[in-house]
């Protein structure tokens, strides 16, 4: 069997995101089938400049064929098209222009996939939103398997994608939340798909002592690993951490590992290590008490999986559906939705070693059960086998039709942001969320999704609830109330380095009250950083089912006879 993997960038020096995901999958599938990677000459995801030479090369055990990008990305042009298709009624031609402006635009890559499709049994396309995946899947729908790497992003609401998504042969999803989004926006329930994610190259031995000796950081630490960017929640993380440090003398130090695209605060309890080797990264993680994942948007957090593989708990942003779902399914972390919950969760993980240890043990079991490489490889091979058997009786799949000349120019498509706002939100914890058309072996490996316990008892002060640890296995955890992402300070004003407009909070999403619903007064102790805070639930009223308990005041103490 021969498989092509088509991805926007590829290389050993590209160490994050969908590109690293694709490289890991390529290298591990190469142990079982013949693999060839088809990609562009781009190295930088902002400009897509042609930094690599076109043609064939070898990266590790995998043969790589590169094709030139026809034009670099102009962030201003891309930002302008993004503003149009995300916020106004627009046409199919507008969306195609947005796709070209986003890049990396490589017609040569798509032509090669089209002309040489007979050489491959299947073609794995990574990242649905890019030029190569859209045009490539349209060209070879009968062999296309999509790894969407979809986030809760406005691009998901564009009208050009659903017909292509419905035409592909199968999906390899990163998470149940991603699957729910894709199925809701495009009606792909009948297309075979399985939640698989990706493994990680975690070393057998790490050394916290080596980290301390190399860096001179001997105090207790929490760690963030990834791109230091506003879209990753780092602005809010810095704000929360500085306020935590003010009220907690002698507390934890925050260690940052990754390339910054925004200024890092000069603070004695924030240490930036920059870009480091894999050995240094894993040593830093081994030395930390826990990992913080503050991102608002993820399709799968590989670094959270790495932390769990090392037995470290994770503190996640509960406003990210995927991170929240991972924390609940693994029972290996806590999550927060505002500053108060963040501080209390940090105190629990730092001040309760037994709790942190059990959460870490749960994470290690979760990683081995669902993300060890034998599990990941088996899911891909089972999908190939399943689709190969189906092919014996399947008819040729035609490419989805494009509207005609006039139809492509009609401004009938709704703003993508409005479409996104109507999609389901929150972690996908329901038992009826199932892999569709997946091979039997993959079904046996899929993640066990616990009951959604949001309606169970919650703490009276609104702190993240921590279940009593059990040494025999995960205990059920109750998520805190849902809330929408707070607006960013630059919403509606400026763009990121890649030209994308800031992602706006979604009306009607998590935590949005129905129109006309009165909100409780603002908490006087709430932070005044400018971030909108979710309304507090009246969890301390001492009532059940809306009826006050007899003989008690709302505050909880017994009523005096004069008050009864």
Image (cartoon, rainbow, N blue to C red):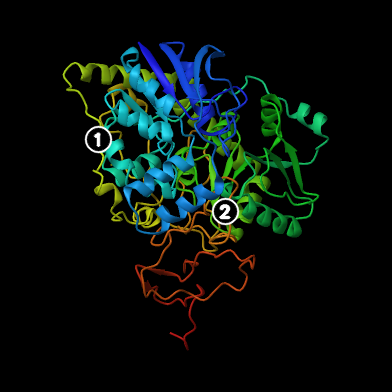
Give the vertical position of 380 relative to 236 (above or below). Answer: above
* Whole-number angstrom distance, CA of label 2 to CA of label 1: 33 Å
Of residue 293 and residue 492, the one placed in the foreground of this image is: 492
Quadrant that contains the N terminus? top left
Q: Residue 211's x, y, as percent? A: 76, 30
Residue 416, above or below 100: below
Give the residue displayed 42% in from the left and 31% down from the top.
132
The outermost residue toward the bottom is 562
Q: Is residue 426 left or right of 280 when viewed as pictured?
A: left
Task: Examine the rendering and report whether any part of residue 372 can be seen.
Answer: no
In the figure, residue 204 lies in which quadrant? top right
The answer to whether residue 537 is above or below residue 481 is below
> Which one is in front, 314 or 389?
389
* Dot 2 crowding, Cα within 10 Å, few <14, some 14–19, many 20+: some
Q: Which image quarter is the C terminus in?
A: bottom left
Task: Quickly name the residue at label 2.
Answer: 495
How many residues crowd mark 1 within 10 Å: few (<14), some (14–19), many (20+)? some
Q: Name the residue under label 1.
A: 400
- Residue depicted at 47% across the width and 89% down the height: 562
């Amino acid at each position: 069997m021969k498989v092509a993997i088509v991805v926007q960038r590829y290389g050993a020096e590209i160490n994050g995101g969908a590109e690293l995901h694709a490289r890991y999958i390529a290298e591990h599938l190469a142990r079982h089938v013949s693999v060839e990677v088809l990609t562009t000459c781009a190295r930088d995801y902002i400009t897509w400049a042609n930094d690599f030479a076109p043609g064939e090369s070898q990266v590790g055990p995998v043969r790589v064929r590169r094709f030139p990008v026809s034009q670099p990305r102009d962030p201003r042009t891309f930002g302008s098209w993004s503003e149009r298709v995300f916020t106004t009624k627009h046409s199919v031609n507008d969306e195609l222009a947005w796709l070209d402006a986003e890049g990396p635009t490589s017609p040569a890559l798509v032509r090669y996939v089209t002309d040489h499709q007979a050489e491959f049994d299947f073609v794995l396309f990574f990242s649905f939103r890019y030029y190569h995946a859209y045009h490539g899947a349209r060209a070879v729908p009968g062999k296309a398997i999509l790894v969407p790497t979809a986030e809760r992003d406005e691009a998901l609401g564009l009208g050009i994608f659903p017909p292509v998504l419905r035409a592909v042969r199968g999906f390899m999803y990163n998470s149940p939340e991603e699957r729910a989004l894709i199925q809701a926006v495009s009606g792909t329930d009948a297309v075979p798909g399985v939640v698989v994610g990706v493994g990680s190259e975690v070393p057998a031995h790490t050394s916290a002592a080596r980290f301390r000796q190399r860096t001179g950081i001997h105090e207790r630490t929490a760690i963030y690993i990834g791109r230091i960017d506003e879209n990753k929640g780092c602005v809010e993380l810095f704000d929360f951490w500085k306020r935590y440090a003010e009220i907690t003398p002698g507390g934890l130090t925050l260690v940052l590992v990754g390339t910054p695209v925004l200024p890092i605060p000069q603070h004695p309890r924030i240490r930036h290590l920059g870009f480091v080797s894999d050995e240094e990264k894993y040593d830093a993680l081994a030395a930390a008490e826990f990992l913080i994942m503050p991102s608002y948007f993820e399709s799968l957090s590989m670094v959270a999986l790495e932390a769990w593989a090392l037995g470290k708990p994770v503190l996640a942003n509960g406003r990210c559906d995927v991170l929240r779902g991972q924390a609940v399914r693994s029972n290996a972390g806590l999550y927060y939705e505002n500053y108060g919950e963040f501080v209390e969760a940090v105190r629990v993980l730092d001040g309760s070693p037994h709790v942190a240890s059990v959460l870490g043990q749960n994470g290690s079991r979760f990683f081995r059960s669902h993300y060890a490489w034998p599990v990941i490889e088996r899911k891909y091979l089972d999908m190939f086998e399943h689709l190969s058997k189906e092919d014996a009786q399947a008819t040729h799949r035609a490419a989805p039709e494009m509207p005609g000349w006039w139809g492509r120019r009609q401004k009938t498509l709704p703003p993508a942001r409005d479409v996104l706002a109507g999609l389901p939100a929150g972690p996908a914890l329901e038992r009826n969320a199932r892999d569709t058309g997946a091979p039997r072996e993959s079904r046996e490996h899929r993640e066990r999704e616990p009951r959604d316990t949001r309606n169970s008892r919650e703490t009276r002060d609104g702190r993240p609830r921590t279940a009593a640890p059990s040494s025999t296995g995960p205990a059920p955890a109750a998520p805190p109330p849902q809330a929408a992402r707070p607006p960013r300070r630059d919403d509606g004003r400026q763009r990121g380095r890649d030209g994308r407009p800031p992602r706006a909070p979604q009306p009607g999403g998590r935590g949005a009250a129905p129109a006309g619903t009165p909100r409780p007064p603002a908490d006087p102790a709430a932070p005044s950083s400018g971030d909108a805070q979710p309304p507090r639930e009246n969890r301390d009223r001492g009532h059940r089912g809306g009826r006050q308990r007899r003989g008690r005041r709302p505050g909880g103490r017994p009523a005096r006879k004069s008050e009864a």
